[in-house]
Image (cartoon, rainbow, N blue to C red):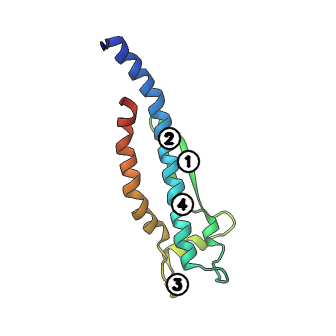
Amino acid sequence: MLHTVGDLSDDLRAVTIRSKRDMRDTVADGVKAGAEIAKDLARTQNPPGSHAKHYPSKISSRMFAGAGLFGNTYSGEYGPFPSGQGLLGLILENGTRNGNRPQMNMARSADIIGPSFAAEVRRLPDRWFW
């Protein structure tokens, strides 16, 4: 089968469209998975009946599209957002000098999700060309 420069041009045009969608979806999946892992870790440390039993439900994720110099960067974050809980997330995550030990759910979840997220990002170009 013979391929021409025109075929390559068509492929590159298709890649620009597909790559944006795939990168956005990969980041979104990564922050959602990170949030779920963090929730699971928080549930083991804050069982029902504890003073922080609602803390796991305060962990969520969100995406920021269009950031960056040219508006084409996708980013996201997950964590205990302060809505409806005040500083409980900071107190539980980081601990206090009054004896509350830090839970470190966000850091532990990042240690778990980080390698698989990096692997997904590395696999993206293979999906675009083959």
Q: Determine the CA span between mark 3 and mark 4.
A: 23 Å
x and y, in percent, of residue 120 in the image: 40, 47
Tell me the residue that label 2 is attached to.
24
Nearer mark to the viewer, of 1 and 3: 1
Q: Determine the CA span between mark 3 and mark 2.
A: 38 Å
Please, what secondary structure does the residue beneath circle 2 have? Answer: helix
Q: Amino acid at mark 4?
A: Ala
Q: Earlier in the sequence, mark 4 or mark 2?
A: 2
x and y, in percent, of residue 61 in the image: 57, 55
Decide: few, some or many residues near mark 4? Use Cα within 10 Å; few <14, some 14-19, many ≥20: many
Q: Earlier in the sequence, mark 2 or mark 1?
A: 2
Q: Amino acid at mark 1?
A: Met
Please, what secondary structure does the residue beneath circle 1 have? Answer: strand
Q: Eyeballing the image, is 109 above or below 74?
A: below
Q: Amino acid at mark 3?
A: Asn
Tell me the residue that label 3 is attached to.
100
Proximity of marks 1 and 3: CB atoms separated by less than 8 Å: no
- Dividing the picture into quadrants, the one containing residue 128 is top left
Between 64 and 40, which is closer to the camera in this rendering? Answer: 40
- Dividing the picture into quadrants, the one containing residue 115 is bottom left
